[in-house]
């Protein structure tokens, strides 16, 4: 064999080897994982909970950072954390009654405190507090008993561990950074992942904190995702990194914005991928964790319309509540949950299992659809006659309430559908049902 031919064969072997290596690294979700994705996408409405002993301060979940507290003195406050009125079953029932199908709770936020029984650290609900009850364990059991899916928020950032490399935050709480060891920290997170995936009915992991370091920081995220899926392949992974989905992720999230929008300033680089979508938003207008002075809760009307808008963009809505330090949900949150539940019991068929309708957002509202049925959600409209762009055939047009038939005229040439509503729409959402053959 000539030297040139030998070089060609060697190059071909290298190319083929690299190709197989790339293919081997390509994430292939399991059948159960895909089923979990499909279930998640149909559910459309979930409850987010930011809860930790930081609720004792009543200043939100970032109090350690915002007040520049010493991490050791801050940790001492955990000795007084005793949420005596916490009742996991009551929480889950309230969420289900509101129409939510899943919940996501912070099992560990940026302050590093774990709300579950962890052998990887003593800074947890069992070892660091007098409460000594596994919050995540009790919620996992209640979710199993009542048929609610459990998702767990987990922060990749840590403001208190010495082995976590100091990033953009956590610079003023007493760490000097000399003991930073990401390999040690990475192994700690892996140990906690194994606990969360084997001790609890965890359907999804909701990661946060990547923006704490520059984009060139090596989080070893591919290795991390592979490890998680090796333990529980069906577990869904999402990450609040504000960019397009990464390899190994199972759903894409958007913070405080609907997909395709960037009003909050977090989604400028977030190209919408092909994974199931989820938008998260606070129920109070300002805070995620409990804040004693934030009583500006979004109205039932605003929350319902936000949910409908999310579905019209093929997205779930994860609406956040910050529980109090005693384990109760704020009265205003319970009021909003009750109002949403009343609406969802009447109009849930236009939400669950639905996706985007044929029209983008209109001045009067949005559209959702399921199968051959499309729903026009009229939020604001001052006429009893509605004309919309429309192609195809129509079997019937009804007012969703009572399924009252409405008169309509289909103009195939102009590609419009004119509907006689009978009266000017009012209330939170007037819904018109269009059924195609």
Image (spheres, rainbow, N blue to C red):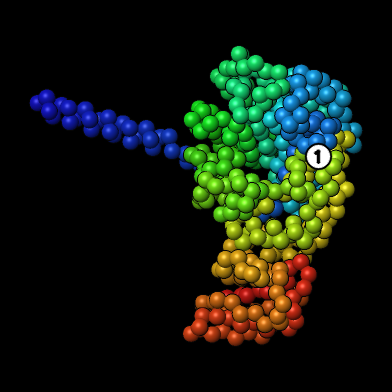
What residue is disc 1 on? 290
Categorize mark 1 by other alpha carbons within 10 Å: few (<14), some (14-19), many (20+): many
Q: Residue at x 80, y 57 (%)?
A: 299
Quarter that holds the N terminus: top left
What residue occupies the far right of the structure in this picture? 84
Q: Nearer the viewer, residue 170 or 36?
A: 170
Q: Is residue 49 visible?
A: no
Residue at the image position 64 percent from the left and 39 percent from the top: 206
Does 390 appear above or below 22? below
- Residue 39: percent from the left, percent from the top? 62, 51
In this view of the protein, which residue sits in the foreground, 229 or 163?
163
Residue at the extreme left: 2
Image-quadrant location for residue 341: bottom right
- Indicate the position of residue 137 as horizontal and vertical percent values: 76, 33
Of 265 and 192, the residue lying toward us: 265
Please tell me in which quadrant of the rendered image residue 211 appears: top right
User: Looking at the image, which is closer to me, 256 or 105?
Assistant: 256
Q: Is residue 423 left or right of residue 158?
A: right
Please state the horizontal and vertical placement of residue 208, each as a whole percent of the image: 63, 36
The quadrant in which the C terminus is found is: bottom right
Residue 166 position (above or below residue 179): below
> Which percent across, then down, holds residue 33?
56, 43
């Amino acid at each position: 064999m000539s030297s040139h031919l030998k070089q060609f064969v060697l190059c071909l072997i290298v190319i083929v080897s690299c190709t197989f290596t790339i293919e081997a690294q390509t994430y292939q979700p399991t059948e159960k994982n895909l089923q979990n994705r499909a279930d998640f996408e149909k559910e459309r409405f979930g409850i987010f909970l930011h809860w930790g002993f930081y609720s004792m301060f009543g200043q939100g979940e970032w109090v350690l950072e915002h007040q520049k507290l010493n991490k050791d003195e801050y940790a001492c406050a955990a000795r007084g954390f005793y949420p005596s009125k916490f009742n996991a079953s009551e929480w889950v029932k309230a969420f289900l009654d509101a129409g939510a199908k899943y919940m996501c709770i912070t099992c560990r936020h940026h302050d590093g405190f774990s709300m579950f029984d962890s052998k990887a650290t003593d800074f947890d609900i069992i070892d660091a507090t007098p409460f000594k009850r596994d919050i995540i364990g009790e919620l996992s059991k209640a979710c199993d008993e009542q048929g609610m899916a459990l998702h767990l928020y987990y922060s990749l950032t840590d403001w208190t561990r010495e082995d976590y490399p100091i990033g953009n935050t956590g610079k003023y709480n007493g760490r000097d950074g000399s003991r930073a060891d990401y390999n040690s920290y990475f192994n700690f997170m892996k140990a906690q992942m194994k606990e969360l995936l084997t001790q609890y009915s965890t359907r999804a992991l909701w990661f946060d904190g990547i923006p704490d370091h520059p984009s060139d920081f090596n989080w070893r995220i591919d290795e991390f995702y592979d490890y998680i899926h090796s333990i529980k392949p069906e577990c869904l992974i999402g990450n609040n990194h504000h960019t397009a989905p990464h390899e190994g992720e199972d759903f894409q999230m958007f913070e405080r914005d609907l997909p395709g929008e960037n009003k909050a300033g977090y989604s400028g680089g977030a190209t919408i991928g092909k994974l199931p979508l989820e938008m998260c938003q606070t129920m109070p207008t300002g805070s995620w964790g409990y804040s004693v002075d934030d009583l500006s809760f979004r109205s039932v009307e605003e929350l319902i319309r936000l949910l409908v808008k999310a579905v019209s963009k093929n997205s779930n809505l994860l609406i956040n509540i910050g529980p109090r330090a005693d384990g109760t949900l704020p009265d205003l949150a319970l009021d909003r949950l009750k109002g949403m539940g009343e609406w969802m019991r009447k109009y849930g068929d236009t939400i669950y299992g639905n996706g985007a309708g044929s029209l983008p957002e209109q001045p009067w509202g949005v559209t959702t659809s399921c199968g051959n049925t499309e729903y026009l959600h009229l939020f604001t409209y001052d006429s009893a006659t509605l004309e919309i762009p429309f192609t195809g055939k129509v079997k019937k047009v009804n007012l969703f309430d009572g399924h009252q038939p409405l008169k309509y005229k289909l103009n195939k040439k102009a590609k419009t559908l004119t509907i006689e509503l009978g009266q000017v729409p009012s209330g939170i959402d007037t819904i018109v049902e269009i059924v195609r053959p």
